[in-house]
């Protein structure tokens, strides 16, 4: 029979039990943290700021290099291109190289209020940029939207001179 004094002395958790509980909490945290609204909204704003900076940089480069540049977009990324002879070639170096979009976000481009859908073609000669940056400093006016969902998104509108206006939509 056990002595009641020894039984009280041995009450508590073993190291293994504590480690199992900590591991379970870590796994749960790993699943929950990415879906917290604050983190995603912050990431979306950071991505939108990055996009705006790259647009301003591309417009400046078009002026400085006296060369027309373009912006191409697909479902997972956007990229800047430059006109070389009679075709468009991707930029290989920073900061205008291909920029992937986080899978948590969807992005769209609107031209004159109409959503643009990228053309799918394997022939690089047939693909043309949807947005142009002219060496004169002008650019194609457009709206860029980056969304977490249909109700929560950021919108960035550019006019022909490159001036931009950002709006946030959070309809719950």
Image (spheres, rainbow, N blue to C red):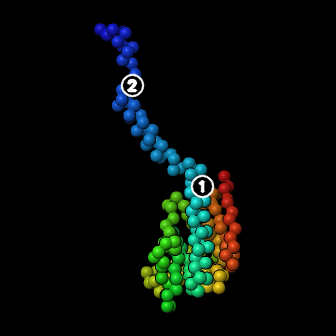
| Residue highlighted by disc 1 | 41
**Measured from the top left, where is residue 157 in percent x and y?**
67, 70
Which residue in the structure is indicated by mark 2? 13
Left or right of 4: which side holds 163? right
Left/right placement of residue 169 relative to residue 69 reads right
Q: Would residue 135 be found to the left or right of residue 80 on screen? A: right
Residue found 63% across the figure and 60% down from its top: 153
Q: How many marks?
A: 2
> Reading the chain from its start, which is encountered first: label 1 or label 2?
2
Observer-nearest of 150 and 52: 52
Q: Establish if 138 lies above or below 20.
A: below
Q: Secondary structure at mark 1?
A: helix
Q: Residue furthest left?
A: 1
Report which quarter residue 152 is drawn in: bottom right
Q: Residues within 10 Å of mark 1 (few under 14, many from 20)?
A: some
Disc assigned to residue 120: none
Q: Is residue 129 left or right of residue 138?
A: left
Q: Are marks 1 and 2 in contact (CB under 8 Å)?
A: no
Rendered location of residue 36, percent (x, y): 56, 48
Residues 60 and 121: in front is 60
Residue 39: x, y in percent? 56, 51
User: Can I make out residue 129 in this image?
Assistant: yes
Residue 40 pos. (x, y %): 56, 54
Give the secondary structure at mark 2. Answer: loop
Which quadrant of the structure image shows residue 69? bottom right
């Amino acid at each position: 029979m056990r002595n009641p004094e020894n039984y009280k002395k041995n009450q508590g958790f073993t190291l293994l039990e504590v480690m199992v509980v900590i591991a379970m909490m870590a796994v749960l945290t790993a699943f929950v943290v990415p879906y917290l609204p604050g983190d995603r909204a912050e990431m979306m704003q950071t991505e939108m700021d990055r996009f705006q900076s790259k647009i301003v940089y591309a417009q400046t480069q078009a002026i400085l290099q006296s060369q027309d540049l373009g912006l191409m977009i697909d479902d997972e990324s956007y990229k800047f291109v430059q006109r070389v002879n009679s075709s468009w070639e991707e930029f290989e170096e920073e900061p205008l190289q291909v920029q992937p979009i986080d899978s948590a976000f969807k992005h769209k481009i609107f031209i004159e209020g109409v959503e643009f859908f990228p053309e799918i073609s394997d022939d690089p000669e047939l693909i043309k940029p949807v947005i142009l940056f002219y060496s004169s400093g002008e650019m194609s006016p457009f709206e860029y939207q980056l969304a977490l969902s249909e109700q929560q998104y950021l919108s960035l509108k550019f006019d022909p001179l490159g001036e931009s206006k950002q709006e946030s939509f959070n309809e719950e």
